Image (cartoon, rainbow, N blue to C red):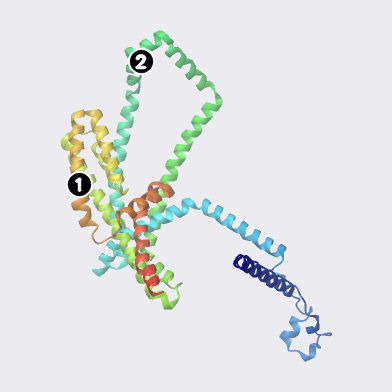
Amino acid sequence: MRVRLTTVWGPVSRWGEYRRRQRRTLEQSGHIDHASLPDDPPPAAALDPETAAMLRYGSAGQPLNRHSPFYIGFFGATGALLAVGLWRTLGALATTITILLVAFFLALALDPLVERLCARRFPRPLAVGLVFAMLLLVLSAIASLVLPTVVVQGSALAARSPEYVSDVLDARWVRDLDRHYDVLDRMRTELVQKLTDQSFVEGLLGGLLGAGRAVLSGTFQVVTVLVLTLYLLVSLPRVKSASYALVPRSRRARVSMLSEEIMRRVGLYAAGQVAIATLNALLSYVMMRIVGVPYAAVLAVTVGLLGLIPMIGATLGAAIVTLVAFFDEPRSAIVVIVYYVVYQQVENYVIAPRVMQQTVSVPGTVTVVAALAGGALLGVLGALLAIPVAAGLLLIYEEVLVPRQQDA
């Protein structure tokens, strides 16, 4: 029984002592020691000019009681409002932050090429100009392959649309449905009703205008990313030096070395991923030309762009090419499937290890989790940036957190 009373009385006594200390602190914080205050302020002639100017309107009073519920509630509510305002500001700047991230990673991917040219005694502005010109040339080549084909195929589809509609209406199953359920007349009635409905027309025009705005916005964002990438490439050494200057001098050398290693890994990973995706696109184009798959140029560009997405990008590109080949000629689809099964084995076990051997070393589990998390947060862009970010965090874990825990 005595043990039970001791067990219960110990926490109760500590709680009572805590409450007594809290009351004493509250009383002292709001207490004014009138005995320590002078009855009459000293004459101004006996004080120096600065003190006399400060006491012109009387001496300062006691500070606010920081344990007052009003004080705590006011500053707590102010902090909450600032947090909400900051969150809304970040939400409004989501597009700008995304553009900045894309430009930064693109600059890191191009920086190794710039450094190689600088190592060969090229001035950095000239090296940046040559690398950026190569980037514009590649983008122009991709646009020249995709845009004319899209325009030609779209025009052909629009020209043959009446023929496709006539073929569908002349089909036997359509005539049977019309005979039993009067489908065509109902469709014609619904179409006339929709076209005469003002809200439907306004919504359709709004959708078309929205699509036009999306195209213009996408073009503007691409141009903005390219301009920011150019500026970052030119000023990257100064940006890094200014960032390192914010770190205390005692830790600046280690922070700079870790940061340089992270940026090196990120840049080489991006360059290696682009090289692998480009090789996949070129070999896919050659295969499609040999097999006779239509739209080879557009499909090759699609395969290359999807190849930038880790884990599932190459599989998605192969699925699209196989689907197009199946609708054109089912036997060609079998050849495409066999090619991509063989190629992906060669890429996974021969090409990718040799290209990525000097870039990032991320375990498979971390790769999968990082890609899933990045895709959930930022979609395709998050999946693209997830693995290099995970590589940087893994380096910090190995070089900072683990040694610190061992020394503790």
Image coords of residue 71 (percent x, y):
70, 65
**Tag 1, which secondary structure?**
helix
**Residue 285 visible, this angle:** no
Q: Does residue 260 appear left or right of residue 188 in this picture?
A: left
Residue 5 to residue 106: above or below: below
**Tag 2, which secondary structure?**
helix
Q: Does residue 18 appear left or right of residue 299 in this picture?
A: right
Residue in front for this viewpoint, 35 or 155: 35
Asked whether disc 2 touches disc 1, contact meaning CB atoms under 8 Å apart, the reply is no
Q: Which residue type carries mark 1?
A: Gln
Residue beneath label 2, please?
Answer: 169
The quadrant in which the C terminus is found is bottom left
Q: Quadrant of residue 212?
A: top left
Residue farthest front in this picture: 1
Residue in front for this viewpoint, 267 or 194: 267
Residue 68 to residue 38: above or below: above
Query: Mark 1 or mark 2, which is nearer the start of the sequence?
Result: 2
The quadrant in which the N terminus is found is bottom right
Image coords of residue 121 (percent x, y):
25, 70
Q: Which residue type carries mark 2?
A: Leu
Residue beneath label 1, please?
Answer: 345
Instruction: Judge depth for marks 2 and 1 and give the one in front.
Output: 1
**Residue 253 visible, this angle:** yes
Q: CA distance from mark 2 to mark 1?
A: 47 Å
